Image (cartoon, grey):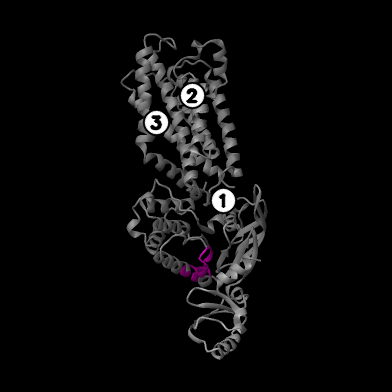
Amino acid sequence: MQSGFITLLYKELLRFWKVSIQTILAPVVTALLYLLIFSHVLEDHVEAFPGVSYTAFLIPGLAMMSMLQNAFANSSSSLIQSKITGNIIFVLLPPISPGEFFLAYVIAAIVRGLAVGVGVFVATLWFVELRLDHPLWTLAFAVAGSAILGCLGVIAGIWAEKFDQLASFQSFLIMPLTFLSGVFYSIHSLPAFWQTVSHVNPFFYMIDGFRYGFFGVSDAPPHLSLAVVLASLAALSFLTLRMLARGYKLRY
Amino acid sequence: MKAIEVRKLRKRFRDVQALDGVDLDIAEGEFFALLGPNGAGKTTLINTLAGLCLPDSGSLRVMGFDVVTDYRRSRRALGVVPQELVFDPFFNVREALRIQSGYFGLRRNDAWIDEIIARLGLKEKSGTNMRALSGGMKRRVLVALALVHKPPVIVLDEPTAGVDVELRQGLWEFMRELNRDRHTIVLTTHYLEEAETLCTRIAMMKQGRIVALDTTGNLLRSVPGRTLRLRLAPDRLPTAIAALHAGHDGLMRTLELRDLGQVGSILESLRAEGISVQDMEIAAPDLEDVFVRIMSR
């Protein structure tokens, strides 16, 4: 690994850290608002998992949703801004390989995702005491989930030629997949058809597996969730690397 | 050694053949100009050298390194000043230079960064965010970014477009100095007098092809004749020399001569008709004349 990679990673981390109110604090506040509203309305009406309060159930889902959305936002916004302002050439001119480019953007996305996730947990500490039965599972899903969304962010950032196209990617793909993945409910509470639909949504496995790390209970077997998440990550990494190696929409 | 070697390079963008079989060698240590009208293919050629564009066919080498198969070494050997004023709004000047240096694997490069900051008159602005800089200052930073890894080959794509005289002169003085240190300099410019003054060799491009390639001296000599400008009293031309008349700017008449030997006979025929010469200028063809002649072929 050449040091161009280290600098690109550092630059990507510095980029979001310099605007951390927007990139970390704002999503934490948004998650907190979701928590306040949904827990207030549904706390006494829903028990998603036996012996787990709705607020406790909701927090990991909200944390994961925030991580995924921000991991996506990090790589996609960095790339689209660089492309539109033209400063993308500063990373295309140096001897940085497609693999280094890929890793720098995806790792920065993971770091931002984890920073937002930690922020959500810290902000919700005094709402409810959370169990953490399997911390390594939690960490594995947090990292892999953020990596998947980091990859999707790179793909979207490279593909989109204007902010409007990126917003479409976010509104019509990322948001529906996130909201229909069991953040706010257990999929067992859904009708059979929607349960089946949920099982083809990889975001469901990310959130379900992440939640398993906390409560030791999940809608799908955690090994299956991990396999789906890792397979999705491998497929998207392959696609992203192919795009970068071919210079798709970057090197004409 | 060849600093740049281009062979049978072709590149097409949809229905436009941007590069149509370009062959070009630039030796190490040359100060070289790439000229041509807008859309001639100059920037595409530069972008292909830099790896920003991928060739359809043909090959390119920078300091002997193939830009596709050995891109790490070819990109280390090349510094490019882009035509557009691009910048990263998240960083100040020094941060931008340190980051760019790091991309090239140079993480302890502060001494050189200090030097180029000083040479390009950026000392006062080194802590200023890129967004807050004027256009001229942004242009200086682009030059600094291209030089930050001390590349042996420096390509400047219209670096003086829209910049003031002071920066222009300072920039060319710096480039001359780098050229004396064996750096190869390639520039594109629409200011042809810059190319004429600075460059030892010139290529002219038109519709994706190189249509002229020679030393600056040979190109200038390729256009025969002289231009003679006269202010006459009374302001009229004898019939004998009327065929040489090429224009009148309201004050002076312009005559196109095949060679200097015609001046004597022109003055004689003016004297014979009682016309006095109040002012006279003789000019050799400049690069602009050469450029216009070649482009109109």
> In the image, what residue type sits under mark 2?
Thr
B215 over A52 or under it: above or below: below
* B247 is within the stretch colored magenta: no
- Badge count: 3
Nearer to us in this view, A6 or A55: A55
Q: Are marks 3 and 1 on the same chain?
A: no
> Which image quarter is the C terminus of chain B in?
bottom right
Among the two numbered marks 3 and 2 on one chain, the one whose residue lies closer to the N terminus: 3
Label 1, residues with CA under 10 Å away: few <14, some 14-19, many ≥20: some
The three-letter code of the residue at mark 1 reads Leu
The reply to whether callout 2 and callout 1 are in contact (CB within 8 Å) is no
Circle 2 marks a residue in which chain? A
Helix, strand or loop at label 2? It is: helix
Residue B184 on the magenta span: yes
Query: In the figure, is residue B87 to the left or right of A21?
Result: right
**Tag 3, which chain?**
A
Place of residue A132 in the rendered image (x, y in percent of width and height, measured from the top left):
40, 21
Amino acid at dot 3:
Val
Q: According to the image, label 3 marks what residue?
A: A116
Closer to the observer: label 3 or label 1?
A: 1
Which mark lies nearer to you, 3 or 2? 2
Which image quarter: residue A19? top left
**Marker disc for residue A178:** 2
> As rendered, which of A4 and B161 lies closer to the eye?
B161
Please provide the residue range marked out in magenta: B176-195
Which percent across, then down, holds residue A216? Answer: 46, 17
Residue furthest to the left in view is: A126
Residue at disc 3, secondary structure: helix
Q: Compared with residue B108, is residue A163 higher up or lower down, i.e. above or below? A: above
Residue underneath mark 1: B52
